[in-house]
Amino acid sequence: MLCVRGNAEDFNNWATLGNPGWSYEDVLPYFIKLEDNRDKEIIESNPEYHGIGGYQSVQRFPYQDKNIKIVQEALQELSYKNPDINGKEQLGSMILQTITRDGQRKSTNKAFIQPIRNKRSNLFIETEAYVTKIIFDPIKKRTIGVEYTSTANSLKSAKVAYAKKEVISSAGSINSPKLLMLSGIGPAKDLKKLGIKVIANLPVGKNMQDHVTFNGVLIPLHQTVTEKSFKHKQADLEEYLKTNTGPLSATGAAAANLFTQTKYEEIDGVPDGQIFFLAKSSADVGTLQIRSYYDTLVAYMYLLAPKSRGYLKLNETDPIWGNPLIYPGYFKEDSDVQQALELIRKTLELFSTKSFKDNNYKLLDSPQAPCEHLTFNTDDYWICMMRNNTLPGYHQVGTCKMGPKEDPGAVVDPRLKVYGVQGLRVIDAAVMPNNTRGNTHTPTMMIAEKAADMIKEDWCAKEK
């Protein structure tokens, strides 16, 4: 739920790569447009960077537990600035804003669709429907529509939705490239191997990027444990249901974030690492986690600009219904390993602060499996741990890369139209040429806002 736009240099880089209209100056109005910022001090301190009245509510959680304040105080002790990271500067620590309204998550469905779904006569929503193929006129290579299957029907009968103007894929960085490849748009060699007729030979599925994450720094809590009895949890639930406040209106310490720069970042003043803390409880059963109640903090480190790249391919056994084969390529480049090491060292500096010491924050300093054969806190130990405790950042982008026609890695042009065919756009995080420096939800919304204007411009010009 964290609201992070990324750094101005991210978007200036997109423009430099041959994508006019995507510089920070170009995209900032769309970040402002989509936002309904509900934190008065943020608006007053940076009015030129924030908006009021957009569809997407943005504000801080109404509840901040004691650990989020301890972490923030420790970061301040280490002389990190406290900027509005969605303003002029991104380097520093901040209790982040979130895509919430009054203690509730404001998903894009709630923010953009629900307010208009009963007001637009030209909007039809069908759930449990999975598009399995984009249909083209074989001569003109122009979209005719899409073939889809309703899983509500046990027979999985195929249906067709026809398009008068164009088809838009907004299935995300995994499923947009999957859909394009199923439809004949992708690496010709791979498609032919699966018996798929090639419509356009493009590097779909390549250029996959993610904020690779390490979570091997554990902090068992002592005097600041937030675990409660069932009776007190029940009281918190009743408070939340009545007022949308209390511990259940937040996610523990997750909103305390540091955006920092390692010596491996080439651009001055730009972060290449993000450090934050997630709650963990020994009482968690299976995958059930209520972030408000915990007895351990886990430091998470994102590499914001990793050099490593991955790719995805169609499932060779079952291309349509099988999950794509994902090869993320994490830590393939040694520079990413060295960058992660520096982020670990920066995290460990927090244990020297008065805030951590006064609150009895202690590092779990016994070697963990499968690296117990190595000396704790050596580089070799941390490299072993990061290779065995690697997590996706769930910020996958780039698999339908935006770029100029002469870019051999490009799938869509700067107006997000797929090369080699007519009437097809990709509008989601897959089009990002390079990842943004932070959580990708908000920049993905920005792409959609900007794309909406481009679509209107294109079709209004034609109809005139």
Image (tube, rainbow, N blue to C red):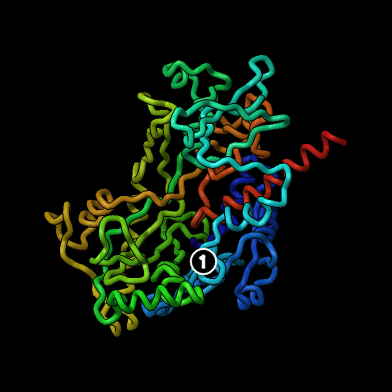
The residue that appears at 49% across and 20% down in the rendered structure is 188
Q: Compared with residue 8, is residue 248 higher up or lower down, i.e. above or below? A: below
Q: Compared with residue 10, is residue 333 higher up or lower down, i.e. above or below? A: above
Residue extending farthest right: 464
Name the side, left or right, on which 369 lies relative to 46.
left
Residue extending farthest left: 373
The residue that appears at 34% across and 82% down in the rendered structure is 355
Quarter of the rendering containing residue 400: top right
> For the residue carrying disc 1, how many other residues have a C-alpha within 10 Å: few (<14), some (14-19), or many (20+)?
some
* Residue 352 in view here: no
Name the side, left or right, on which 324 lies relative to 91.
left
Q: Which residue is mark 1?
A: 104
The residue that appears at 24% across and 56% down in the rendered structure is 382
Which type of secondary structure does the marked residue at label 1 adopt?
strand
Q: Nearer the viewer, residue 110 or 170?
A: 110
Name the side, left or right, on which 241 lies relative to 454.
left
Quarter of the rendering containing residue 53: bottom right
